[in-house]
């Protein structure tokens, strides 16, 4: 059997047994019922309006709420504070300046949406003829004046200064005043700013700017008998045209006719052109008109003329009988209805996807028929494999789609060789000229007969993991298979499988193979979980792109699912984003969710002919413009049967149609037929920002931030939260936000991680600029930015003034300490100088007298023994006087510099050398000239030097003595070296002199060493 014969007419009945229609693209109506589940306590909503910032305001009897697309916020307290108590809200409307006007039983309140202040006025006060405080509705004329409807059909005019300036009272009828229950329900403004009031009667009253009646027109003309007709409602269909709907009592049907306001002419009476007689009509640009009555909602497609009645669907959504009060068409085209069962939001989406094998799902996360490999045969038929599509109680695993007729055939496979309940699950189908082959989700390779739906199975031995992952036709006689752990090869002639894991050589082994693609120089590019491999025709590895040391192209991600060559670049769909690979220059660029992707897990990248790549992810489809690097994302509201797509489930057919399979069938579309010119530019609003004040242990929320105003945080603030919204309510689940905090240190755009909330645990002190952008409904990032300067105050203990004050205080205390220490040192120096002077004057003079008298006594004595005693007295007095001189010098202040010590040492050494007849050399290091010594160290240093010099003069018989002082390692080193006869340290007796030298060195926290040997001189070293 030939595959191309499947499309022939004789086979249509057999071939399309168990067929189903593919669902054609159409306008998708999305209905959402908002109530307690979304935070709105009461389902009984009465009226609603949209303010100038884009927020929706909802009145529920006595409460006033604001909705931002994510949550409801209660503003009843703001209203009651302005009024002075509670009241019943009758109507809310959007004022000319975007403010919200609230009509209630006490007056009219005007809410400023920017600073969220409320001002209440009582328009009835100036008019004595007004006997009611009930205000029922609000209208506006072209001059931005408000007209408030009150009982008995009256209107009060309120000027732009919110002052009541005029009162309209309808004329009496046959001498009877208008009933108290009568009210003006419509105020029409024509092209010349003339006002026409319609109440629940049969009259249309033209009212001038002073509230006077100009002319009254009866809306039941002479050709209509009031016994058979009554005016049901009046709506404005043009600048000078009204549509009057009549209730025809006979037959209980509605009729309609046009009325020209300016000329007063009635058009012919006709049947209604829609099934709903509306109390109001809302037009959205030139696309749709919404018709609303108290019991029905419908829309008219102005391009096709098709009317869709949504009443039944709304009834099914609410689950109860419905009654509609107010309605509002928001700026984004969403239609809102306030009813007894909640707030209803209706949005429209032009579907671009044709769906096959999809089933209705109760929840977004539910799973329908999971589709795997999608391929196209030579005749243009599309083949898809699934994990089971249930139809008529049967389960089908293989499917064939006829895209020309939008028909599908579902096949049940069975084995040719045995009767068994065993079920094989095909993964992907490929074709030769005459045959159909498939790999399965297990380990079988199938040859399929489509007519009989029978298969012949070949078991692949030892397939790693759970089975096959990809399938590739090298030629009509050879197929390559990818598995969870490598590659396989099978020939169509002998059907003998070969696993490359078992074959010696350089092949892909123990790695999951995801995709095959023809490559340059007649090679094959293979996507794996370890990057990309370029294979020769024998499946051997020619080259690898990844993250290994020898790879010529380094990839930022290794888990590659699919590749395509487009616009002179290689594009890789990976588990970490989309990679653009410049093969010639060996450069790569990674695109992630931070750039606009809905999800980083990308299964396929299919090109169209308009410069785009279409990416299947786990969060819908994404269109990537390769020239601008912009993303546009598509979700359930755009007609996708499911958000999560599958690996290996994609196809670009010969006619350019793209097919993507996921967890609920196949989505198909032709990119050439799509209108991609629309660009959603939406404003961005800050809902509120909050902080946690650690000092007060309290969270503060600010809802009145003015655009551009600086936000200031105190030092103890933390846990900052910013909530944003965009007045695009089409699909807030697809709205994404990103931010840039300039001054933080990273100026790149970052994605919000919590929906519409931006969270910072803390911010260091400093000045920042916060910028936020929004992507609405999956569109590209809006060029409009919300921005605000943020200042985080520095704690007082970290401020500049605190540092300056602290430095001044520390300096002042140091100065005081220095002065006190200086005084103490001066006092000590005075004491030292006093002691030195006393010792020099008192003891020194006494010793000098002893020496003088001893010398005089020696000259008078004749006996030798007496002379020896007196001479001894004289010598001891001279020694004491000399020692006293050293003590006086060490105690006396003003000689604390080490150079003063060196000067005295040099003087002593030179004098001693001259008297003993040896050479004396004294050298000092310039690094220690400014070193200061305390009194004790100065004395010990000098006395150690003096003792060493005396020993050299008395015992060494030296010809020369060298003294050196150096600075080494933060210590001062004194070296005294003579060239005398030396001594043996082991046999020398340590007298008082040496013992004193060691003790003095210890008192200096120094170390004294003596090195000597017979006939080699002596070296004394002191380090302190």
Image (spheres, helix red, strand yellow):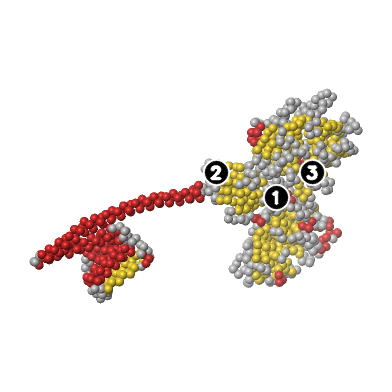
2 or 3: tag closer to the N-terminus = 3
Label 2 to label 3, Cα distance in Å? Answer: 48 Å
Q: Which residue is mark 1?
A: 776
Tag 1, which secondary structure? loop
* Vertical side of 740 occupied by 692: above or below: above
Q: Which residue is mark 3?
A: 283
Question: Is the residue marked by circle 3 packed among few (<14), some (14-19), or many (20+) residues within 10 Å?
Answer: some
- Whether residue 786 is visible: yes
Outermost residue to the right: 223
Question: Which residue is painted at 67% across and 58% down in the image?
Answer: 602
Frontmost residue, 818 versus 840: 840
* Vertical side of 188 occupied by 8: above or below: below
Q: Quadrant of residue 857?
A: bottom left
Label 1 to label 3, Cα distance in Å? Answer: 22 Å
- Whether residue 324 is visible: no
Frontmost residue, 824 versus 384: 824
Frontmost residue, 103 versus 397: 103
Question: Which residue is painted at 70% across and 65% down in the image?
Answer: 569
**Label 1 vs label 2, nearer the camera:** 2
Outermost residue to the left: 863
1 or 2: tag closer to the N-terminus = 2
What is the quadrant of the N terminus in the image?
A: bottom right
Q: Which residue is mark 2?
A: 693
Question: Is the residue marked by circle 1 packed among few (<14), some (14-19), or many (20+) residues within 10 Å?
Answer: many
């Amino acid at each position: 059997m030939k595959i191309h014969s499947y499309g022939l007419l004789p086979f249509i009945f057999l071939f399309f047994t168990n067929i189903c229609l593919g669902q054609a693209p159409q306008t998708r109506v999305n209905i959402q019922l908002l109530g307690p589940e979304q935070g709105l306590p009461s389902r009984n909503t009465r009226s609603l309006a949209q303010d100038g910032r884009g927020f929706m305001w909802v009145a529920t009897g006595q409460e006033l709420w604001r909705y931002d697309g994510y949550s409801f916020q209660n503003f009843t307290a703001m209203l009651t504070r302005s009024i002075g108590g509670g009241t019943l809200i009758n109507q809310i409307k959007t004022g000319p300046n975007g403010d919200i006007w609230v009509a209630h039983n006490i007056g009219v309140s005007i809410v400023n949406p920017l600073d969220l202040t409320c001002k209440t006025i009582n328009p009835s006060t100036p008019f004595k003829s007004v006997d009611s405080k009930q205000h029922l509705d609000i209208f506006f004329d072209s001059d931005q004046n408000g007209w408030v409807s009150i009982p008995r059909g009256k209107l009060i005019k309120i000027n732009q200064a919110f002052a009541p300036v005029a009162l309209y009272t309808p004329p009496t009828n046959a001498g009877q005043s208008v009933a108290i229950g009568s009210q003006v329900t419509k105020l029409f403004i024509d092209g010349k700013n003339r006002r026409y009031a319609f109440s629940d009667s049969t009259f249309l009253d033209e009212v001038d700017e002073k509230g006077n009646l100009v002319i009254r027109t009866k809306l039941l003309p002479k050709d209509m008998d009031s016994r058979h007709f009554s005016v049901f409602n009046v709506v404005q269909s043009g600048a000078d045209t009204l549509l009057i709907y009549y209730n025809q009592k006979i037959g209980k049907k509605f009729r309609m006719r046009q009325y020209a306001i300016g000329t007063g002419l009635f058009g012919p009476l006709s049947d209604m052109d829609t099934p709903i007689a509306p109390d109001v009509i809302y037009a959205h640009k030139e696309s749709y008109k919404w018709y609303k009555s108290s019991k029905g909602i419908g829309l008219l497609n102005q391009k096709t003329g098709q009317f869709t009645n949504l009443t039944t669907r709304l009834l099914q959504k609410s689950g109860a009988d419905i009654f509609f009060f107010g309605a509002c068409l928001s700026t984004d085209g969403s239609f809102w209805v306030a009813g007894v069962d909640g707030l209803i939001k209706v949005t429209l989406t032009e579907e671009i996807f044709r769906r096959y094998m999809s089933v209705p799902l109760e929840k977004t996360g539910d799973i329908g028929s999971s589709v795997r490999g999608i391929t196209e045969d030579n005749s243009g038929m599309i083949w898809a494999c699934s994990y089971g599509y249930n139809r008529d109680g049967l389960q089908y695993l293989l499917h064939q789609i006829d895209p020309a007729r939008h028909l599908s055939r579902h096949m049940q496979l069975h084995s040719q060789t045995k009767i068994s309940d065993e079920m094989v699950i095909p993964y992907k189908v490929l074709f030769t000229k005459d045959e159909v082959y498939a790999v399965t989700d297990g380990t079988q390779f199938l040859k399929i007969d489509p007519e009989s739906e029978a298969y012949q199975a070949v078991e692949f031995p030892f397939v790693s993991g759970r089975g096959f992952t990809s399938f590739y036709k090298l030629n009509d006689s050879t197929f390559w298979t990818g598995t969870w752990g490598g590659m396989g090869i099978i020939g169509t002639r002998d059907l003998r499988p070969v696993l490359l894991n078992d074959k010696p050589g350089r092949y892909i082994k123990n790695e999951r193979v995801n995709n095959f693609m023809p490559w340059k120089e007649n090679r094959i590019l293979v996507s794996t979980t370890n990057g990309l491999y370029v294979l020769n025709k024998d499946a051997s590895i020619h080259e690898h792109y990844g993250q290994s040391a020898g790879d010529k192209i380094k990839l930022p991600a290794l888990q590659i699912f699919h590749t395509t060559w487009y616009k002179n670049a290689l594009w890789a769909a990976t588990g970490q984003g989309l990679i653009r690979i410049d093969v010639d220059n060996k450069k790569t660029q990674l695109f992630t969710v931070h750039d606009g992707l809905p999800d980083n897990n990308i299964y396929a990248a299919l090109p169209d002919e308009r410069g785009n790549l279409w990416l299947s992810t786990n969060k819908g489809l994404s269109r990537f413009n390769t020239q601008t690097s912009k993303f546009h994302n598509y979700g359930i509201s755009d007609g996708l049967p499911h958000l999560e797509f599958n690996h290996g489930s994609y196809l670009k057919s010969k006619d350019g149609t793209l097919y993507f399979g996921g967890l609920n069938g196949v989505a198909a579309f032709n990119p050439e037929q799509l209108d991609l010119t629309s660009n959603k530019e939406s404003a961005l609003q800050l809902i509120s920002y909050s902080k946690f004040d650690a000092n007060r242990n309290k969270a503060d929320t600010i809802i009145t931030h003015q655009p551009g105003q600086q936000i200031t945080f105190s030092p103890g603030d933390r846990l900052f939260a910013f909530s944003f919204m965009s007045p695009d309510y089409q699909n807030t689940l697809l709205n994404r936000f990103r931010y840039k905090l300039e001054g933080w240190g990273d100026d790149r755009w970052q994605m919000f991680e919590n929906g519409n909330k931006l969270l910072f645990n803390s911010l260091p002190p400093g000045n920042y600029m916060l910028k936020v952008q929004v992507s609405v409904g999956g569109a590209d990032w809006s060029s409009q930015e919300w921005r605000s300067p943020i200042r985080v105050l520095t704690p007082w203990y970290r401020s500049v003034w605190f540092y300056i004050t602290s430095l001044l205080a520390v300096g002042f205390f140091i100065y005081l300490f220095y002065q006190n220490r200086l005084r103490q040192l001066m006092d000590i120096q005075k004491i030292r100088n006093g002691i030195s002077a006393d010792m020099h004057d008192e003891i020194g003079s006494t010793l000098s007298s002893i020496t003088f008298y001893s010398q005089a006594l020696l000259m008078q004595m004749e006996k030798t023994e007496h002379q020896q005693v007196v001479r001894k007295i004289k010598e001891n007095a001279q020694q004491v006087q000399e020692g006293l001189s050293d003590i006086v010098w060490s105690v006396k202040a003003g000689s604390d510099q080490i150079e003063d010590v060196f000067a005295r040492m040099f003087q002593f050494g030179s004098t001693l050398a001259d008297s003993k007849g040896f050479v004396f050399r004294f050298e000092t290091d310039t690094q220690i000239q400014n070193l200061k010594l305390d009194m004790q160290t100065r004395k010990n240093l000098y006395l150690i030097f003096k003792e060493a010099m005396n020993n050299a003069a008395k015992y060494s018989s030296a010809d020369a003595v060298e003294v050196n002082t150096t600075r080494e390692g933060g210590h001062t080193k004194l070296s005294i070296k003579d060239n005398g006869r030396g001594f043996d340290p082991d046999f020398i007796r340590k007298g008082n002199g040496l013992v004193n030298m060691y003790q003095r060195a210890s008192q200096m926290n120094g170390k004294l060493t003596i090195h000597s040997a017979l006939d080699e001189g002596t070296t004394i070293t002191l380090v302190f």
